[in-house]
């Protein structure tokens, strides 16, 4: 038994995927100037990388739950449709 409904998953997954894209873009914005980052900016990057890793783990778990629901015949969009830009 799921602790979250399929419909809730269909709402949360695209939101989390969008947040991951946003944070990834923020991280990449400093890629060109890695050697010039202040100590605070370096710390912020490390925290952002950690957060992204956690978010990806959560998204992977949600994907597994969602795909299980789809396999049971739930009539919802595919996972790929949910995470598409």
Image: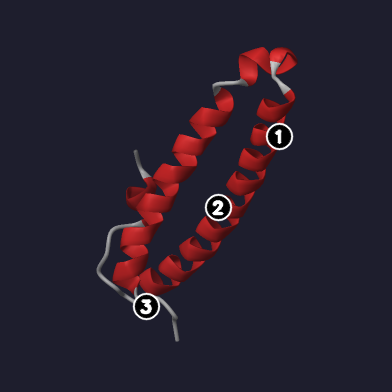
Query: Which of marks 2 and 3 precedes in the sequence?
Result: 2
Residue 13 rendering spot, x and y as whole percentages? 40, 57
Query: Which of marks 1 and 3 precedes in the sequence?
Result: 1
Residue 53 rendering spot, x and y as whole percentages? 63, 48
The answer to whether the residues at label 2 and label 1 have Cβ atoms under 8 Å apart is no
Which of discs 3 and 2 lies nearer the camera? The answer is: 2
Q: Secondary structure at mark 3?
A: loop
Residue at (74, 26) in percent of width and height: 39
- Give above or below for 21 relative to 56: above
Q: Secondary structure at mark 2?
A: helix
> Which residue position is annotated with label 2?
55
Q: Secondary structure at mark 1?
A: helix
Between 32 and 43, the one nearer to me in the picture: 43
Q: How is the image coloured?
A: secondary structure
Instruction: Give the Cα separation between the discs numbered 3 and 1.
Output: 44 Å
**Disc assigned to residue 72:** 3
> Which residue position is annotated with label 1?
43
Residue at (69, 18) in percent of width and height: 37
């Amino acid at each position: 038994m799921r602790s979250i409904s399929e419909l809730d998953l269909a709402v949360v997954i695209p939101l989390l995927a969008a947040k991951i894209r946003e944070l990834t873009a923020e991280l990449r914005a400093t890629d060109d100037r890695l050697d010039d980052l202040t100590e605070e900016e370096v710390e912020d990057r490390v925290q952002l990388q950690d957060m992204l890793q956690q978010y990806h783990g959560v998204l992977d778990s949600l994907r597994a739950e969602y795909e299980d629901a789809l396999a049971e015949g739930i009539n919802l969009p595919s996972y790929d449709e949910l995470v598409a830009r």
